[in-house]
Image (spheres, rainbow, N blue to C red):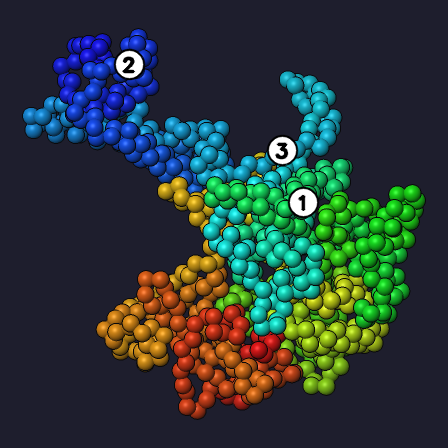
Amino acid sequence: MIKHLILAHKNDPNLHMVYTYKNHFYRQHKGEDIAHEGDIADHPSENDVTPMETDHPSNEIEEGNRTELKLKRANAFYILRTKEVNLLTQKCVDDIVLGTGELIRSTVETVGNGVRECLNSAGIPYETVPGLQELFAANNPVSNPFEHVSTKYKQMSFFKQEFGLIEPRRITVGHKSVRKRSGTMYKQVLKDEEMMYIPLLEILEQLLNMDFVLSEIQVGHQSTNGLIQDFCDGQLFKAHPLFSSNPPALQLMLYYDELEITNPLGSKTGTHKLGVIYLTLGNIPPLFRSTLDAIQLLAVATYPVIKEYGIGTLMEPIMNDLALIEQDGGYQFMVKHQPLSLSGTIVFVSGDNLGAQLVGGFKESASANLRCRHCMGTVDEVTSKFREKDFTLRTRAGHDHQCECIEQDPDLSKTYGVKRRSILCNSRYFHVVDGLPADAMHDILEGVLQYECKEMLNIFINEQTYFTLQQLNEKMKSFDFGCYNDKNKPSPITRQALKGDANNVRQKAAQMWCLGKFLPLMIGRMVAIDDEYWQYFLLLLEIVDIVFSTSITVDTLGVLEGLIEEYLWGFTNIYPGRSVIPKMHYLVHYPSHIYRFGPMTRTWCMRYEAKHSYFQRLAAYMGNFTNVAFTLADRHQTHNCHVTNNSNGERKEGLYKAKETTVESGKQVVVGDSVYFDELRHNERDLQPTDMVYEAKKVSIHGTVYKVKSIVHTGWMDELPEFASISKIVVVGPSSRVYFVLTKYVTKQFATHYHAFEACKPRNESIILLQQCQFKHYLPLHAISISSVADGLIYIAPRCNVPKC
């Protein structure tokens, strides 16, 4: 220590040591070259020992390191959040880092000068105050907050180390010769053809380190009331060679689709088209895994690359990682710094019909003799047979044999409807024959329901003249679909859509669901009760209600099978000359699909396609298409990094943020003055009359929004559902426990002609108090009044069929 004082502070009149030599050295000379001092810091002499060194200086150093790291994390998260929330380009981020850094340095310098002046005015030399110079030094993290994230390389390195960023792997699948300008001339160069892969094992390990995910995997969520509510309630799970003996095994749900990220009518259509594979973990309950952030990006490549090298190239790295999970004993993950071995496999691969045919190795064109990936039905059979038992179903052994025959004679591809053996069949458990479920979104909402509406409306408008197209569009414009359908209001139907060759009325899936649900209430009073076309439309709505149900009994599947057969036979009879499209044939397989995979809403594409909007918006904001697959994959991973961390550098379970309850606009009231106090006290024993509760106008629970005056399904009475209107939403305690004060309705009957329940308020109104978990179905509903019926009656059209249990 004496040697150090002589060498370093011989001429320093302001030396004032108030801490140990080691602390002094760390704070005053960190980063300096002290080799000329004989490595004093590493080899202190006996004279270095002072009485104050007994205060454990190493603890102070560790505390200083932790504080500095916490500050670095907060500053880095500021950059990360600004970038991802606002979808900024890297250039914008660099400008923000530079500008914000300069602003902070200028501010700190100004504050430092002010402190110096104040101290000098008080007669206190600035240099004599311990630690003040270091605090305002130019190299202090306070003055230079973004030094560790000043470039993209530093940012990505810090995000990876501190925030658990999983970077996409760039896999070269081939090369192509392109012309590249060099000066004033073009020259031919080789360009890498790449796909992006986010490692499956790393994604799963990150998810397993979330307490919520690990708990759900260990506990499971199988139904205990006999209802089919998710994949784990289906027959495939119960009879599966892996899941039947190992229920906590990982259920990997994959999805493949192609999406345009540019104007579909522009000149770049197809050039920047992407093929994406998403991943969802089926062990998570549907309530939480349906959030968009819970859908993981697994692989992405431009469509030209997929077309050139095949879909198998995109899936090959996935299958390599899958083999490790499927092996005996599973794969050893590091969870909470401890090894944990888990097995798993693909349970199904979702997609639209073209996407499913592509990944399954089936023919995508309509030229195949056997067009269905589920059965061996010929072109003639699928238009004349409407029960699954009338078809020969495809089997694993039969499919493998067909693939072998096609390898020897490619001309058999058209005969069997198979192009090649899919790489997915390399799985130990999964096979494309029984792992590519139908998609109700494309088959019904963008297929059969639109087809039926088009044909029926043509008859009603042009032949039976119940109303005109203008009257229909005016009715749609003025009709109250309810606040929950404000974003899904159907678009006006054009005459070109009704007269065109396409089998649709040009509505999006959500719009068509809304239109089909409320069309009976819009035009029902103008249509004859015994109209044959109307009766078959209502029959289709019965099918839709069951198909989109989230809870189904096995007995209901038999009813569904009969309804589908009746509808398809009826369609061919009342619309002679109109073809039975392939999407109609797929309905035949729906009952068995529900029995095996669970409700159709667990395998449909609706939520996955909603995920596409993130990439489409991001591509528009970025405007960089040089290597668009890498750009989007890279940004998706930093987005995931943002939602799974906070400003303190602590991990959070933002991927499953639907667990949170959010309360909006309302007022505080004294609970003792309320009409619901006695009812509330049955649930809240510690509640006192003088306590305050919050009456909200709107609340979101698990991602579902409830508003005052909404309708909810509360129970059953004499085979009819009971409904109630939300009068008040009461929020109790710091944990935001939500109670609904409800006014009951009396359900009179199911009005078949309007496909809705008819209800009214009772003469003696009574209130009940329920929580969301006590509702028979979680989705809120909207009540409709029809001017042509008796006063006081309302009509309630449930979103789907709800079984009585």
Q: Position of residue 746 (x, y in %)?
A: 50, 86
Q: Which of the 4 quarters of the picture holds residue 24? A: top left
Q: Is residue 34 above or below residue 141?
A: above
Amino acid type at image mark 2:
Ile
Q: Is residue 272 above or below residue 35?
A: below
Q: Position of residue 13 (x, y in %)?
A: 13, 14
The residue that label 1 is drawn on is: 327
Q: Which mark is residue 170?
A: 3
Q: Which mark is residue 142?
A: none
| Crowd band around label 3 with a 10 angstrom C-alpha radius: few (<14), some (14–19), many (20+) | some
Mark with earlier residue (3, 2): 2
Report, in whole angstroms, how far the alpha carbon at label 3 lies from the one at label 2: 48 Å
Report, in whole angstroms, how far the alpha carbon at label 1 lies from the one at label 2: 56 Å
Report, in whole angstroms, how far the alpha carbon at label 1 lies from the one at label 3: 26 Å
Q: Decide if residue 550 is in sight here.
A: no
Q: Position of residue 727 (x, y in %)?
A: 40, 77
Residue plotted at (51% across, 80% down): 715
Q: Which of the 4 quarters of the picture holds residue 244? A: bottom right
Quarter of the image for the N terminus: give it: top left
Give whichever of 522, 664 is nearer the camera.
664
Q: Is residue 195 above or below residue 355?
A: above
Mark with earlier residue (1, 2): 2
Give whichever of 2, 769 is nearer the camera.
2
Mark 3 residue element: strand
Mark with earlier residue (1, 3): 3
Q: Position of residue 485 (x, y in %)?
A: 54, 66
Residue plotted at (86% across, 57% down): 370
